Image: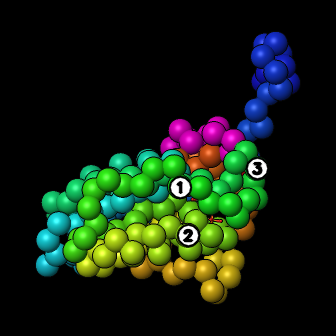
């Protein structure tokens, strides 16, 4: 093991300590979600799957490849955390999809619902653009407050710990891990 600053490049990164959801568990659950989503939108024309970046990028990539209906993909960039592990509550939208949402079935894909602030800010803005339907698929949900947005699809109920991997970061680290771990 390298100790802090052993390479002269500053303090060592903390290492994720406990695997919470393995790559195999995630893979099975993503396939189940994709099957449910494919069935739910069977009758729908022009499904738009809208990923909330950056955290959802790996989940999105796996999910859309397992959805058996033809659909389009776009992204939305929002951030609320900065470099901390507690939501700042200040949600910034850096990129709004240019795709028209008017009359379209929109499925927002989120990595994790924590305080619910991000979805609480983003969903009304999307709703204002007159989609024919607006649903959410979140990979993880911390279920902190019964008043939090209730996504139609949730992959896993998450422990109230700071999770990283499979797209989730801590100060931009760990997104590439193929599993989800607790810091
Ligand atoms: P919320 O607005 O508090 O619901 O938080 C939503 C966003 O914060 C998520 O889309 C994540 O990007 C980030 N986030 C919340 N909890 C965690 C966590 O445990 N690990 C990594 N990112 C998180
Ligand atoms: Mg996010």
Q: What residue sits right under mark 2 in the picture?
A: 121
Residue at image position (36%, 55%) is: 97
Write down the region rendered in magenta. 170-181
Task: Answer with left or right where residue 89 lies relative to residue 71.
Answer: right
Determine whether 57 is above or below 90 in the image. above
Question: Residue 84, labelled with which disc?
Answer: 3
Task: Answer with left or right where residue 155 lies relative to residue 129.
Answer: right
Name the element at disc 3: loop
Q: Residue 124 location in percent, x, y?
A: 47, 75
Q: Is residue 28 visible?
A: no
Residue at image position (39%, 75%) is: 128
Magenta residues, dominant SS class = loop
Q: What residue sits right under mark 1 in the picture?
A: 93
Q: Residue 11 location in percent, x, y?
A: 83, 26
Structural crowding at the residue carrying mark 2, measured as other residues with C-alpha within 10 Å and reported as few (<14), some (14–19) or many (≥20): some
Q: Residue extending furthest bottom?
A: 146
Residue at image position (68%, 82%) is: 145
In space, the residues marked 1 and 3 are separated at their CA atoms by 18 Å
Task: Answer with left or right where residue 75 lies relative to residue 141.
Answer: left
Determine whether 14 is above or below 21 in the image. above
Name the element at disc 2: helix
Q: Is tag 1's residue or tag 3's residue first in the polypeptide sequence?
A: 3
Q: Nearer the viewer, mark 3 or mark 2?
A: 2
Residues under numbered marks 1 and 3 in contact, where contact means CB atoms less than 8 Å apart: no
Name the element at disc 1: strand
Q: Is residue 14 visible?
A: yes
Q: Residue 56 location in percent, x, y?
A: 47, 53
Structural crowding at the residue carrying mark 1, measured as other residues with C-alpha within 10 Å and reported as few (<14), some (14–19) or many (≥20): some
In space, the residues marked 2 and 1 are separated at their CA atoms by 9 Å
Residue 15 lies in magenta, yes or no? no
Q: Is tag 3's residue or tag 2's residue first in the polypeptide sequence?
A: 3
């Amino acid at each position: 093991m390298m100790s802090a600053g052993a390479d002269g490049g500053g303090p060592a990164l903390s290492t994720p300590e406990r695997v919470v959801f393995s790559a195999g568990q995630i893979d099975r659950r993503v396939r189940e979600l994709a099957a449910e989503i494919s069935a739910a939108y069977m009758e729908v024309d022009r499904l738009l799957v809208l990923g909330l970046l950056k955290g959802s990028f790996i989940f999105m990539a796996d999910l859309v490849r397992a959805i058996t209906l033809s659909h389009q993909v776009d992204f939305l960039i929002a951030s609320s955390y900065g470099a901390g592990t507690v939501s700042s509550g200040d949600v910034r939208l850096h990129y709004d999809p240019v795709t028209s949402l008017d009359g379209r079935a929109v499925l927002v894909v989120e990595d994790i619902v924590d305080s619910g602030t991000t979805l609480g800010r983003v969903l009304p803005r999307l709703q204002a653009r007159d989609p024919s339907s607006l649903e959410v698929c979140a990979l993880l949900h911390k279920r902190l407050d019964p008043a939090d947005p209730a996504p139609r699809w949730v992959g896993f109920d998450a422990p109230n710990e700071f999770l990283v991997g499979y797209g989730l970061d801590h100060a931009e680290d760990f997104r590439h891990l193929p599993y989800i771990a607790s810091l």
